[in-house]
């Protein structure tokens, strides 16, 4: 099936959102934890966390228009420059999904959605205790994407909590063993299963195809 | 295992790249196809395609520093504003992986890596014929990320080619049926398997946790 520019513009809103949220392929499932300066915590699900670079260790995520609805996550990040990114696992995917409800700022999604706050000395924001792979982040900058009033929120990893077994292999960290879930569209969650690993590519070692 | 800021800075380069490329969780596997104004084509694997918004339908991807090595993909995008994003499937994941070799600009990764160019009227850049889910893109803007000299390349979807069955269900498009692969780290590829689907969240319908 081929859809051109006009077909895309004529899609009804629900089909449009359903399809365009799937076109990029599988998306990582993460919970972003924050806290305001009065100690109220916030937790929100994001599928747009993206690797920006390894040295410095930078991650980005896309934030919807800040004027649209109250954005507790971003307000909290601006207030104290601290946030956490926590992988989602099957045991609490349903809990994670429901953090997308528009709760009042006075309600913590941790408590309402049955997840546990965890703190370490070097990070003000709360981690999700149930997550096995998580990062403490220092906010750096929010780049405006003027075409749709979203923001690319850029932060540096300042702490990393991951399973002890992650370094046992010389290979890439195995996301199947850690059992981190993927997202497609707005509501669908996926297991990931290791399929193959290929060597770092040197131009003189490319096989014949 | 907990790593703080200093531990992260002291990681050897290989471990650092291996770990930091995995921390965001599962990444989508896509091939980006381009063509220069003399008709030479280029194809490159990217794991950083990210959904920016549905109306207009915008996608971004992260491009490594343009001064570092020749960036045929970006030169071609700037030349004619056209590119394609093509999902990767298991049948040609190995071919896709080897497009990351630093071939000379005169060598097309399509030919060298055994993939087939496909064209439609409304898009100058070549699609990957073997891909079942793909987008023709119009370049809009490249936002500089000054912390590491990368770019967020922003484009609008102008055509969409996807399986006829994608609209049969009222649910999200099923990436397991389309069999689009995920990536973690630099070299590891994953199948995705549907785990669960939860309803759009209305605040008064959140279950007790």
Image (tube, coloured by chain):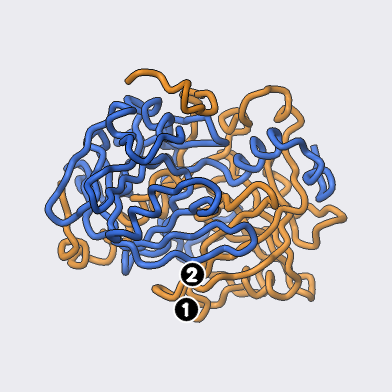
Chain colours: A blue, B orange
B11 relative position to B108: left or right: left
Same chain letter for marks 2 and 1? yes
| Residue projecting furthest to the bottom | B67
Disc 2 + disc 1, Cβ < 8 Å: yes
Density class for disc 2 (Cα within 10 Å; few <14, some 14-19, many ≥20) is: some
Residue B95 visible from this viewpoint: no
Whole-percent x, y for residue B99 in the image:
56, 59
Density class for disc 1 (Cα within 10 Å; few <14, some 14-19, many ≥20) is: few
Residue at numbered disc 1:
B68
Q: Residue at x 71, y 53 (%)?
A: B157
Q: Residue at x 48, y 74 (%)?
A: B65
Q: Residue at x 57, y 50 (%)?
A: B51
Q: Using the image, determine if residue A68 lies above or below residue B43.
A: above
Residue B203 visible from this viewpoint: yes
Q: Chain of mark 1?
A: B
A188 relative position to A16: left or right: left
| Residue projecting furthest to the left | A121
Distance in Å between CA atoms under marks 2 and 1? 8 Å
Q: Residue at x 76, y 71 (%)?
A: B80
Whole-percent x, y for residue A29 in the image:
42, 39
In front of the other: label 2 or label 1? 2
Whole-percent x, y for residue A7 in the image:
83, 43
Where disc 2 sits, the SS reads: loop
B146 relative position to B126: left or right: left
Mark sitting on residue B64: 2
Nearer to us in this view, B84 or B42: B84
Q: Using the image, determine if residue B187 lies above or below residue B164.
A: below
How many marks the image carries: the answer is: 2
Quarter of the picture containing the C terminus of chain B is: top left
Q: Chain of mark 2?
A: B
């Amino acid at each position: 099936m081929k859809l051109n520019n006009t077909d895309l513009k004529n899609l009804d809103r629900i089909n449009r959102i359903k399809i365009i949220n799937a076109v990029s392929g599988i998306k990582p499932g993460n919970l972003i934890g924050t806290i305001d300066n009065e100690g109220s915590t916030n937790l929100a699900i994001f599928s747009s966390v993206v690797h920006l670079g390894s040295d410095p260790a930078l991650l980005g995520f896309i934030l919807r228009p800040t004027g649209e609805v109250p954005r507790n996550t971003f307000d909290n990040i601006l207030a104290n420059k601290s946030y956490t990114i926590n992988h989602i696992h099957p045991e609490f995917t349903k809990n994670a999904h429901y953090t997308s409800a528009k709760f009042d700022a006075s309600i913590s999604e941790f408590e309402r959605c049955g997840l546990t706050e965890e703190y370490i000395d070097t990070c003000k924001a709360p981690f999700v205790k149930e997550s096995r792979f998580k990062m403490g982040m220092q906010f750096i900058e929010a780049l405006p994407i003027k075409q749709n009033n979203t923001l690319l929120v850029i932060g540096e990893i300042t702490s990393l909590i991951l399973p002890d077994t992650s370094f046992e292999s010389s290979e890439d960290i195995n996301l199947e063993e850690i059992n981190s879930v993927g997202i497609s569209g707005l509501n669908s969650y996926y297991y990931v299963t290791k399929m193959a690993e290929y060597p770092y590519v040197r131009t003189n070692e490319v096989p014949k195809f």
